[in-house]
């Protein structure tokens, strides 16, 4: 399997990286639309979003545990 | 005081601790959408910086992650000087402080491969994207390779034609 984007290999080679078949296989599942959205944000905005998502995940875990009687 | 892991970056910056943000937090700074549960840093191993690190972290009750409770562990300058890489649990979450990173080396060796970011009003050093990819490739664990796939896609998005 190759990269989704034909230019990826040339860009990677510019930085001294060779294509790795395992990484290329994982790359098929990368949601690039999500990355493009993220790249429009500042690093600070990205960390704020991640912090909020982490808090939500922790709260969901806690709620699930409570429901299971844990 | 830092209420979460993001805040600990500010605490370290305010205390003048020389660290480089690596791992998942660095990946997020570069645009990664993956969640991370810990914060990873490479710290400078000078005596002055070790003293600043120990003092800055003390309010967060650092303890060896995964170790049994009650060990006489203190994250103080003698302990830091005796060791190198520390995987810690703290009051605000899990934090790793590495004196040397696989695939990257020491603070001084990584410094040319960092970018400065202004986050929460502080300037912090973050490992640049190619160096982060190199380090994750060197680590070679399945979870790292999965992360590399996203980081390489990010590199292509940043450098390729839109």
Image: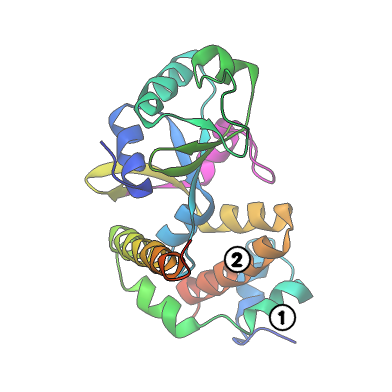
Measured from the top left, where is residue B125 in percent x and y? 41, 42
Question: In terms of image quadrants, where is residue B130?
Answer: bottom right
Distance from disc 1 to disc 2, alpha carbons, whole Å, reads 12 Å
Q: Residue furthest right?
A: A21
Q: Looking at the picture, how far across and down is residue A60, in whole percent?
A: 39, 69
State which quarter of the image contains the C terminus of chain B.
bottom left
B121 vs B59, left or right, is left
Query: In the image as oriented, which residue stretches furthest toward the front?
Result: A69
Q: Is residue B116 left or right of residue B100?
A: left
- Label annotation for residue A25: 1
Q: Magenta segment: does it hold B105?
A: yes
Quick check: B99 above or below A1? above
Q: Residue at x 56, y 12 (%)?
A: B78
Quadrant assignment, res B1: top left
B93 sits to left or right of B117 = right
Q: Which mark is residue B147?
A: 2
Number of marks: 2
Q: Residue at x 56, y 74 (%)?
A: B153
The segment highlighted magenta reads B99-117
Q: Nearer the viewer, residue A24 or B72?
A: B72
Disc 2 packing (10 Å; few <14; some 14–19; many ≥20): many
The reply to whether the magenta stretch includes residue B89 is: no
Q: Position of residue A10 (x, y in %)?
A: 65, 75
Disc 1 is placed on an element classified as helix
């Amino acid at each position: 399997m190759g990269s989704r984007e034909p230019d990826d290999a040339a860009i990677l080679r510019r930085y001294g990286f060779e294509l790795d078949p395992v990484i290329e296989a994982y790359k098929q599942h990368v949601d690039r639309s999500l990355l493009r959205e993220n790249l429009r944000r500042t690093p600070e905005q990205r960390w704020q979003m991640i912090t909020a998502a982490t808090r939500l995940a922790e709260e969901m875990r806690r709620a699930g545990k409570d429901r299971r009687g844990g | 005081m830092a209420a979460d892991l993001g805040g600990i970056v500010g605490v370290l910056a305010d205390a003048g601790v020389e660290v480089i943000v690596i791992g998942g937090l660095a990946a997020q700074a570069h645009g990664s959408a993956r969640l991370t549960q810990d914060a990873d840093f490479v710290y400078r191993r000078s005596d002055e910086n070790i003293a600043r690190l120990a003092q800055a972290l003390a309010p967060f009750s650092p303890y060896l992650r995964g170790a049994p409770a009650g060990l006489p562990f203190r994250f103080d300058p003698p302990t830091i000087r005796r060791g190198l890489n520390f995987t810690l649990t703290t009051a605000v979450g899990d934090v790793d402080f590495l004196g040397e990173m696989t695939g990257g080396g020491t603070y001084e060796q990584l410094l040319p491969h960092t970018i400065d970011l202004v986050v929460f009003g502080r300037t912090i050093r973050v490992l640049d994207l190619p160096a982060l990819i190199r380090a994750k490739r060197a680590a070679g664990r399945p979870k790292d390779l999965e992360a590399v796939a996203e980081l390489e896609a990010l590199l292509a998005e940043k450098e390729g034609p839109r």
